[in-house]
Amino acid sequence: MPLIRLKLRISPFITTDFTGKFVKTLLINTNPELEKIFEDKKYPSPKPLRITPLLEDKKEEPVYPKVVITRFGEVAGKPKNSPNPISINGLYHVYIGYEKSLEPEINLTITKLLGGVELKYGNDVRVKLVEYEKVEQEVPREFNSVKVYFITPAIFVDPFVKVSQTDKDRAKRFIPFPPLIFSVNVYDLFKETYKRNIIRLSYSLIESHTILNTVTKVWYYYDGKWLPGVIGYAKFFLRKGIHKNAKEAVKKILENAIEMGVGSGRAAGFGFVKMKFDTTS
């Protein structure tokens, strides 16, 4: 599944919302054929397209109203105040991951962005693509551990609802446990053997004892509401001596997560991750 990075020059506007909404609006405005993927609730899930919010040009820090809980155990109630407005102006990055079947739609979108597009987003906004790059990041055939960096808020999907074959509910999960983090990726890849591969993943990746010190909660502002998500990073060790089939399954799951993100809301800009592998023997 291709993953591309766009460098955009954006004229000034002000927002108080998650900037993934702006990116989605931009892409639909640029290529209306994408609207059914983003907006049609009957479209198959998981969606074959993921985006990020706007990312700062230099550090690639995501731009959105947020309140980060910085200390473990800190009082973490929902913020009471509305967020301060954010000024957008200049160069930003956006990542887009998609299934190969969407190549014609994505190519058309890129072509139009190269010429510059205008849209209404509070006021008239002009966007022009100034740089385009295909991102290649492979999972090593052999690695000892992996750090998973949650760049944008992750909203984990509970695999045990599907495994237990109970009616779906809206309960959210927040513990950075591999089957919660990667449940959507497992479903993307292994629909027919979902239960087996959720168990494989749970067994194969072992969390570091530091994990509760390196992940934290973030309150993000979306559609007029403060909502919770997970940011920071989680380190996992690959269990030694696992079967080669399990190792290959884990590799595919991690590759899918890099390209398509993790959790729910990937087509809205949530669950963008980067990974760093330790391959030292």
Image: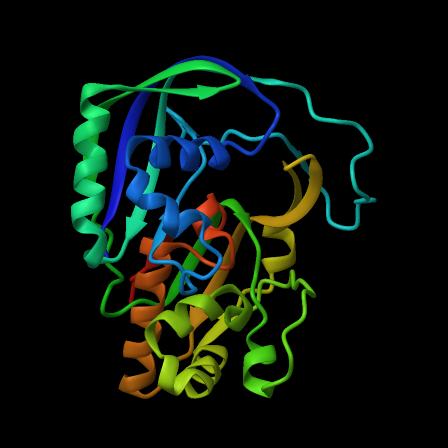
Locate residue 241, reporting x and y percent.
35, 85
Q: Residue at (24%, 26%) from the top-left corner?
A: 113
Quadrant in the rendering for residue 143: bottom left
Relative placement, left or right, of 206 versus 190 is right
Relative placement, left or right, of 97 versus 141 is right
Q: Residue at (51%, 58%) from the top-left corner?
A: 264
Q: In which quadrant will I find the C terminus?
A: bottom left
The answer to whether one can see residue 168 in this image is yes
Q: Nearer the viewer, residue 32 or 59?
A: 32
Q: Residue at (50%, 31%) from the top-left corner?
A: 19
From the viewer's perspective, is residue 102 above or below residue 187? Answer: above
Count of marks placed on residues: 0
From the viewer's perspective, is residue 187 above or below residue 276? Answer: below
Relative placement, left or right, of 97 versus 181 is left
The answer to whether one can see residue 69 in this image is no
Relative placement, left or right, of 187 versus 138 is right
Locate residue 158, reporting x and y percent.
59, 71
Locate residue 29, reporting x and y percent.
35, 31
Q: Nearer the viewer, residue 42 or 157?
A: 42
Quadrant in the rendering for residue 70: top right
Q: In which quadrant will I find the N terminus?
A: bottom left
From the viewer's perspective, is residue 51 above or below residue 156? Answer: above
Q: Residue at (49%, 57%) from the top-left corner?
A: 41
From the viewer's perspective, is residue 143 above or below residue 126? Answer: below
Q: How is the image coloured?
A: rainbow
Locate residue 245, reporting x and y percent.
28, 85
